[in-house]
Image (cartoon, rainbow, N blue to C red):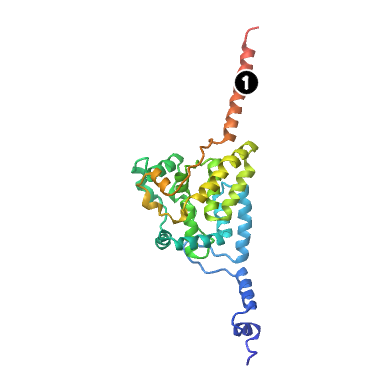
Amino acid sequence: MSGSGGLFGRVSIAGGGPLTALLELAGGLVTRPQPQYATHVPLSGLEKGAVALLSLWGAFRDPRRGDLVAASGETTGLPAIYAMRERMRRSETGRRILQDRPLITDEVVAPCWDMPQHTFGGAYARFMGTRGFLASGRPPCRFVDDPELAYIITRARQVHDFWHVIFGCHTNAFGETALKAVEFVQTGLPMTGLAVLAGEWRFRPEDRRLLNEQFLPWAVRAGARAPDLMCIYYEEHFGESLEELRLRWRIEVAPSTPQNTQKLQAVNAQAAAAAAAEGVSGDAAAPA
């Protein structure tokens, strides 16, 4: 009777030894979990690994692919998301956020458009409006199995534009890369570090020098100096002065950034070529 049930029966009787853990791990590699929330796409361990590799490669080659950036963040960032949850649970405001699970939608931020420009909400509305951004435009979480962890990665994604405003980061290549470095310091998400490396790879040498000498040192300093930015209930501060919030939250504003030196160089080159062409045509038209 002690031998009934075969190998799996003996493992169960053993009370969960190393072999049980190994079998559970192997099962997790090929078994999909049950859906846990509306946008959840359950994947087996092997499928997650494939999505992680392919999305990382695609996001590195083209950081503008928001779907690939999101997928790589969800499939590679689980330890960092767990750490964010622990920090939020230790914070009174963080616990409230986890309990309420607020979402940043167009309806939630609609009052910001009527707020004075010196307020956080007014500055946010100006930032979003001048760029044609929508608060509801962030992709939903799909590949994180735990609903609470899925909310945390969603929250981190949705407050990104708030961080642009409070740090004064432009949305050009310098501003986005520098803010990703701040996010890496704050959250530890691997995808944010990869985004910084991708920026380094794509920049020209003179742009890379500017990034490394000014923007990345600022990002490390500013990210370490600020409080845990995942534990701020931003929606409750829309009507407050942006400058006062920066002082309260120990925010160091980003260096003023060129719109993009690569674009400026291209414009200058085009202008020089046009001027040269005009000069040639003028010489040709001059009387002998």
Question: Where in the figure is residue 276, as x and y percent of width and height?
Answer: 62, 20
| Quadrant housing residue 173 | top right
Question: Where in the figure is residue 2, as x and y percent of width and height?
Answer: 63, 91
Q: Please give the name of the residue rendered at 60% of the width and 62% of the height, measured from the top-left corner.
A: 48
Question: Where in the figure is residue 18, as x and y percent of width and height?
Answer: 64, 77
Q: Quadrant of the C terminus?
A: top right
Question: Where in the figure is residue 19, as x and y percent of width and height?
Answer: 65, 78
Circle 1: residue type: Ala
Can see residue 194? yes
Mark 1 — residue?
276
| Quadrant housing residue 91 | bottom left
**114, above or below 271, in the image:** below
In this figure, what is the number of numbered marks?
1
**Is 121 positioned to the left or the right of 65 in the image?**
left
Q: Which residue in the rendered view is the most extreme toward the bottom? A: 1
Q: In this orientation, which residue lies closer to the viewer: 77 or 60?
A: 77
Can see residue 180? no
Q: In this orientation, which residue lies closer to the viewer: 107 or 95?
A: 95
**263, above or below 228, in the image:** above
Q: Residues within 10 Å of mark 1 (few under 14, many from 20)?
A: few
| Quadrant housing residue 33 | bottom right
Q: In this orientation, which residue lies closer to the viewer: 287 or 120?
A: 120
Q: Which residue in the rendered view is the most extreme toward the top? A: 288
**173, above or below 138, in the image:** above
Q: Please give the name of the residue rendered at 62% of the width and 10% of the height, measured from the top-left corner.
A: 286
**Is 129 positioned to the left or the right of 194 in the image?**
left
